[in-house]
Structure formats: structure tokens, C-alpha cells
Amino acid sequence: MTISKGNVVTALAKFQANRLQLIVTSIEFQGNILPVEITAYDTDGQAGLYVPFSPERSALLK
């Protein structure tokens, strides 16, 4: 099945070290909820998005 560009995808997010981990467990498409297992990767090839100086991360450390 191919899901066209422009559909909304919602992810669970959590901070781990200097990375924002994003995990998608389902996608709503044409009125159906499709189970998936998708992990976001950054351009460096590692899981999660690199965010070393994000305000959210700074707030967690204080």
C-alpha cells in the first residue's frame, strides 16, 4: 500500500540524550487506522533527531 504525500502522521516523542526520538505506531488513511512501526532517523543515520540545545531539553535538566 502506498500512502500519498500530505497525510498527517502523529508520532510519540521523547528526549533521550541529545536526541528527540520519534516513533509512529499507526497512520490514519482513507478512514482506516493502519498499524505501522516507523522510527525517525536523522541525516547522520542515527535514530532520533539531533537537538543538542533545545529549550525542552534544557528545561528537563534544570
Image (cartoon, helix red, strand yellow):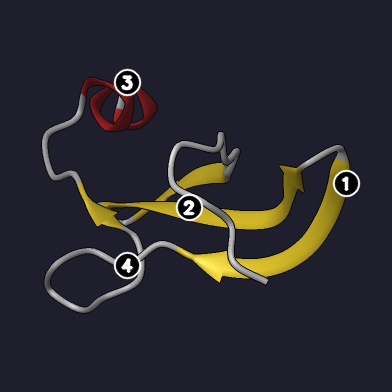
Residue 19 location (% of width, % of height): 29, 54
Q: Distance from label 3 to label 1 (Cα)?
A: 38 Å
Instruction: Identify the residue under disc 1.
Output: 32
Vertical arrangement, residue 14 with respect to residue 46, above or below: above
User: Is mark 3 in CB contact (under 8 Å) with mark 4?
Assistant: no
Q: Work out whether mark 3 precedes mark 4 in sequence or the reverse, and give the earlier one.
A: 4
Residues 56 and 30: in front is 30
Mark 3–mark 1 CB contact (< 8 Å)? no
Q: Residue at x 71, y 67 (%)?
A: 36
* Element at label 2: strand
Which amino acid, by three-letter code, is at mark 4? Tyr
Question: For the residues marked 1 and 2, what is the alpha-carbon distance in whole angstroms?
Answer: 22 Å
**Disc 2 or 4, which lies upstream in sequence?**
2
Q: Residue at x 52, y 43 (%)?
A: 13
Residue 28 horizontal/vertical position (percent): 75, 42
How far is the residue under mark 3 from the one under mark 2? 19 Å
Q: Which residue is mark 3?
A: 59
- Residue 49 position, x and y percent, is 27, 54
Q: Are marks 2 and 4 in contact (CB under 8 Å)?
A: no
> Which comes before the other along the chain, label 1 or label 2?
2
- Asked which secondary structure carries label 3, the reply is helix
Relative to the observer, which residue lies in front, 38 or 6? 6
Disc 2 residue type?
A: Leu
Q: Residues within 10 Å of mark 3 (few under 14, many from 20)?
A: few
Residue at 50 percent across and 45 percent down: it is 14
Q: Which mark is residue 41?
A: 4
